[in-house]
Image: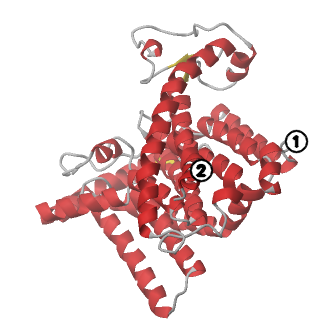
Amino acid sequence: MEAAVVGAGGAGLTRWQVAALSAVAGWVWAASFYDLTRRARALVQPWVTRRVHAETTAILRFQRLQHKLLDNFFSVLSCVVSVPFYTGFLPLLFWSGHGKLARQMTLLMAFCDYLGNSVKVYHLFIIQLKDIVSAPRPCSPPVRRVTATEDEKENAMEYGLPSSHALNTVCLMGYLLHYVLAYGEHGSVMIAAGLSLAFLLVMLVGIARIYLGMHSLTDVIAGIGFGFVILAFWLAVHDHVDAFVVSEQNVASFWAGLSLLMCFAYPKPEFPTPSFEYHTAFNGVAFGIVYGIQQTYFHFHTPDAPLIFSPQLPLLAFAGRVLVGIPTILVVKFCSKALSKWLLPVMCSTLGIPIVSSCYVPGLKVDNSKSKPDAKQGVGYLQRVFSLFPQKAYDVDTGIRFVQYASLAWSVVDLVPAIFTHLNL
């Protein structure tokens, strides 16, 4: 219990934590001052664009196999390996007693989301590839694009390289396989079966993204390649990350500072895409999980926690957890969103931080017909600090989205397990 108390109430950030946050802040400033996103994009984008256009003919030949069954199969497969599916699956993993696997996969997914979507936008680490490169998806038409769900329609609005589905599948299937082999009983047959299943799923996902017209072969190969690089890195550091989250000092303060910097460290794409919204949501999820685990690790999330199908957590009790837990976290998400929509604009106005709203707060929506060189709020100390960054006004929706997903994640690992304990589930 001492580690949790120390972690929650340490005297201040350690030297390495201050150094790490300072390094990230310095990189954000340098990347903005020297316009590194535009420079990186100018180097990479033309080559990638030529490759995507050159592969259009091959994609059209492949799509001659068009069949309703293939459309349905590959659409369902893309949904099963999508971010919304994993997001819904992770709370069940926490409540089933596999706490370490759940928090590692949550942080890994947030890491993949940041790295993958940023590449498609290069501010930090080369991570934001999608929006850095800003490479197009295969042209539709002539390529037939199948978007069976709203999530797929939003995905189609993002840039192409790398394929996030391929990247996430490599990372999460790879880590899941590592976890099973590291902590469960296994033999050579199980190892071979696990590797075969992971390889088959990655190949099917890659084929699905090309068949559905969402990606070129270059996008898929890049996603798989980056996925292996990220997975290798994560396997090298995951034990250190887990030890830091559950027992280090000042974790919540450090992660709060890191989360704030991550919002500024995201590169600006050539044209607006939903990628930053996903990044903000997972940024909030990562903070909520870390904060909740830091507060309640010794209560609910130790290795001694009961596992599903054990006498302490039979299937019926787990079903009760799901029936109680899912509505609870949705209520927390709704309430935190409503509260932050009212509270954050008031706080920003009081502190003199210039804000606009692209969606959530109608009274703050940007009027594109009018020039807004100056914000309405008075100039205060914080506004002068924020003026060091390139924006003249900040989208309060980012804060609202962060708060609601951080609250949701916190409730998964803190509030809901407390309710389970009270109900003897």
Q: Nearer the viewer, mark 1 or mark 2?
A: 2
Q: Quadrant of residue 265?
A: top right
Give SS at disc 1. Answer: loop
Q: Quadrant of residue 298?
A: bottom right
What residue is at 88 percent from the left and 41 percent from the top? Answer: 11
- In space, the residues marked 1 and 2 are separated at their CA atoms by 27 Å
> Mark 1: few, some, or many residues within 10 Å (few <14, many ≥20)?
few
Q: Nearer the viewer, residue 84 or 28?
A: 84
What residue is at 57 percent from the left and 41 percent from the top? Answer: 406
Reading the image, the residue beneath label 2 is 418
Name the kind of residue labelled 2 in the image. Ala
What residue is at 59 percent from the left and 63 percent from the top? Answer: 99
Give SS at disc 2. Answer: helix
Q: Position of residue 31 (x, y in %)?
A: 65, 38
Q: Quadrant of residue 122?
A: top right
Q: Nearer the viewer, residue 221 or 112?
A: 112
Classify the position of the N terminus by image quarter: bottom right
The image's mark for residue 11 is 1
Q: Position of residue 259 (x, y in %)?
A: 64, 41
Q: Nearer the viewer, residue 31 or 279?
A: 279
